[in-house]
Image (cartoon, helix red, strand yellow):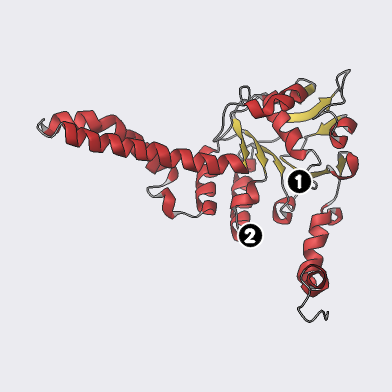
Amino acid sequence: MVEGTALAAVTYRAPPSADAFPFSVASIASLREIALDRPVTVLVGENGTGKSTFLEALAIAVSLPVVGAAPLARDPTLAAQRSLASCFRLAWRRRTRRGFFLRAEDFFGFQQALAAARAEHEAEIARVDREMADASNYARTLAKGPHRASIGAMDVRYGKDPDAASHGEAFLRLFGSRLVPEGLYLLDEPEAALSPQSQLGFLAMIKDAVDAGSQFVIATHAPILMAVPGAALYSFDGGEVAPISFEQIDSVRLVRDFLNAPERYLRHVWPSESGQE
C-alpha cells in the first residue's frame, strides 16, 4: 500500500466582491480550509448547499481531466466555478495530474457519445463495403482497418455490447478502466447509476485503488458511500462546512429510521384513501 495522500488541504480566501454566486452560497462564504489528509473524503449535504460547486471548483484548481464532458477550462457552464477555483490555494504532499473528475450526468452523456462513435465507425465500414465492392479484399481490409481498430479498442475498454449492460455495469466498467495507481479522483454523486449492491462493488474498487495510493473526494447522498471506513466526512448543511460523524448525518438517520418503521413516514406523504393512519 502506498502511504499518504496527494492533496493535503484546500484553503479559500474570498475575493473583495463576494456577493454573487458561487461566493454567496453560505457554505462557501464560511469556508476557510478543508483538510484532505485521508485517502477518502466524503462531502454530504442537501441539494443546493454547495458541495457540488466546491467539487467542480476543486477539479478546476487541480486541472483534472473530466470524463464525458467538455474540458473544465472551456465548459461554458462552469464560469462561476472557475472564479471560485482562482480563490483556492492547494497544499500538496505529492503533486499529481493522474486521475479524473466525474459527474453522474457526464457519465450518461459519455454513454451516448460512445454509442454514437461506435455507430459512426460501423457506418464507415458499411460504406467501404458498398463503395469498394469491386476492389480486392486486401484493399477493403486496409480501408476498414482504422474503424475496426477503433471499435476493437472500445470493446476491450467498455465491453462488446455496452447497450446490453445496465447503467450500473457500464459505470463500474468505465470507472475501473480509468483507474490508475496514485491518482486523484473527484466524484460527484456517483451513486446515480448504481444500485445498493453495485455501490458495495464500487466501494471494493475504491478500496483497491486506495491500496494503490489513490485518493478520492466524493460528494454523495448515498449512506453506503458515506460509510467508507476511515473516511473524513464534511457536511455542507447549516451554512458552513464542518466535520461530521456518520451517525450524525441527517440522511443516514432518515434512511435508518424509515427502514425500521416506514409506516411512520408514509402515513404523512402517502395517506390511505380512507384517511385512516
Residue assigned mark 2: 196
**Label of residue 67 in the image:** none
Looking at the image, residue 268 sits to the left or right of residue 194; the answer is: right
Residue furthest to the top in view is 16
Mark 1, secondary structure of its residue: loop
Rounded to the nearest angstrom, the CA distance separating label 2 from label 1 is 19 Å
Residue 271 against residue 230 in the figure, above or below: below
Residue shown at 86%/38% (left/top)?
241
> Is residue 136 visible in the rendered structure shown here?
yes
Number of callouts: 2
Residue shown at 74%/34% (left/top)?
53
Mark 2, secondary structure of its residue: helix
Based on the displayed image, in which of its 4 quarters is residue 182 positioned? top right
Taking depth in this image into account, of 105 and 40 the one nearest to the observer is 105
Percent x, y for residue 122? Answer: 30, 39
Residue shown at 40%/39% (left/top)?
154
Taking depth in this image into account, of 203 and 166 the one nearest to the observer is 166
Q: Quadrant of the C terminus?
A: bottom right
**Label of residue 231 in the image:** 1
Looking at the image, residue 73 sits to the left or right of residue 109; the answer is: right
Percent x, y for residue 11? Answer: 83, 26
